Amino acid sequence: MDAQTKVELIKSFAEEIVTENELLNLFQTNDHPKVYDGFEPSGLAPIHFGLLRAANLKIMLETGVHFKLYLADYFAFINNKLGGDLQTIQEAGEYFVEVWKACGIDTSKVEIVWASKEMDSLKYWDRALKIAKKTTLNRALKSVTIMGRKEGENLNFAQLMYPIMQVNDIFQLDLDMCQMGMDQRRANMLAREIAESYGWKKPIAVHHPLLLGLKGIQNNGGTKEEMLAASKMSKSDPSSCIYMHETYESLKSKINKAYCPERIVEGNPVMDYAKNIVFKYVKEVKIERPEKYGGNVDYANYAMLESDYVSGKLHPADLKLCVTNELEKLIKPVREHFEKNNKAKALYENLKNAKITR
């Protein structure tokens, strides 16, 4: 596979690449660049972890990258997730790995890295201090959006270190590329600036779109980043989230209640799921409906579906049922894995009974 083809594969899911020319040069000069995505193990897996990011990873592995799955246990501890209980957080990390296995990820092709182990060195904290020296307090405060917080929120001092630590991880892991959601953009841009300041390797930033929560866009009067953080699907908010363990009945109920205005695409979570999940896994979807409502119709791509939805030819009720059925096909194997695999089942049951904190 040539370098340009690899770039096109990344572009197939990325909302932003900083920069595309750097990415092309990377693939021309490095057959196995180091790439990562990081996660706070902080609750039951939502579909943006189990489906969206798993789909992105499968595409990235096609390009031959050395992918590092970063389980940010200490970050979840700092962010007071799961009550700040580190043991529970680490069990949640093991559970996340099981989710990806159930989603068809060959974890033998992925390097699993724990934050707590990477931080256990003087070299790590020496570099963190150097990064902190180049970062103003105001910049750190603005960057707390990367952990789902907002500027002005009552934070402890450890949480102010969160952006510094995330930037440090990029250099600690010797990364060529960061592949993360748009909500992590501030940390990645800071890392690029820090790299230029010290002459360190500058990481390429690939940002994928965030998956909307079931309530759609939430205008909380904050900055664009804060509005984005408030609107994304959050595993700590069951009313906005679809989990990888949903039964068909609960999935159907959640989708039926989802914000889905007729003819409107922007801010519509059901259309978002069709675009960023369903059509990443299937080449065609079928809408089944009575002849009086237009009869059955097949869509070979998302653009065709969107066109009919905007024109009013596709009703929200039919869209919701279609997306429900397609998501069920994707969730069902994961649900069954956690029912049949003893290790996975035990991890799920323990996490299901844990205290979920924001």
Image (cartoon, helix red, strand yellow):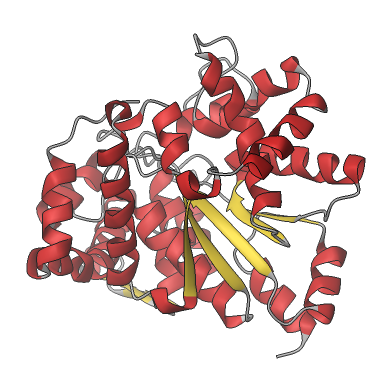
Q: Quadrant of residue 3?
A: bottom right
Q: Residue at x 74, y 22 (%)?
A: 139
| Vertical position of residue 266 compared to residue 52: above or below | above
On-image quarter of the N terminus: bottom right
Q: Quadrant of residue 245?
A: bottom left
| Vertical position of residue 47 compared to residue 189: above or below | below
Q: Residue at x 13, y 58 (%)?
A: 248
In the drawing, does residue 183 fall left or right of residue 217?
right
In the drawing, does residue 354 fall left or right of residue 179?
left
Rendered location of residue 150, percent (x, y) = 55, 19
Q: Residue at x 61, y 44 (%)?
A: 182
Q: Compare residues 18 and 39 and report the one nearer the observer.
A: 39
Q: Residue at x 32, y 36 (%)?
A: 86
Q: Residue furthest front?
A: 122
Q: Compare residues 283 and 60 and report the one nearer the observer.
A: 60
| Vertical position of residue 58 compared to residue 230: above or below | below
| Vertical position of residue 86 compared to residue 39: above or below | above
Can the viewer see residue 123? Answer: yes
Total marks shown come to 0
Can the viewer see residue 301? Answer: no
Q: Quadrant of residue 67?
A: bottom right
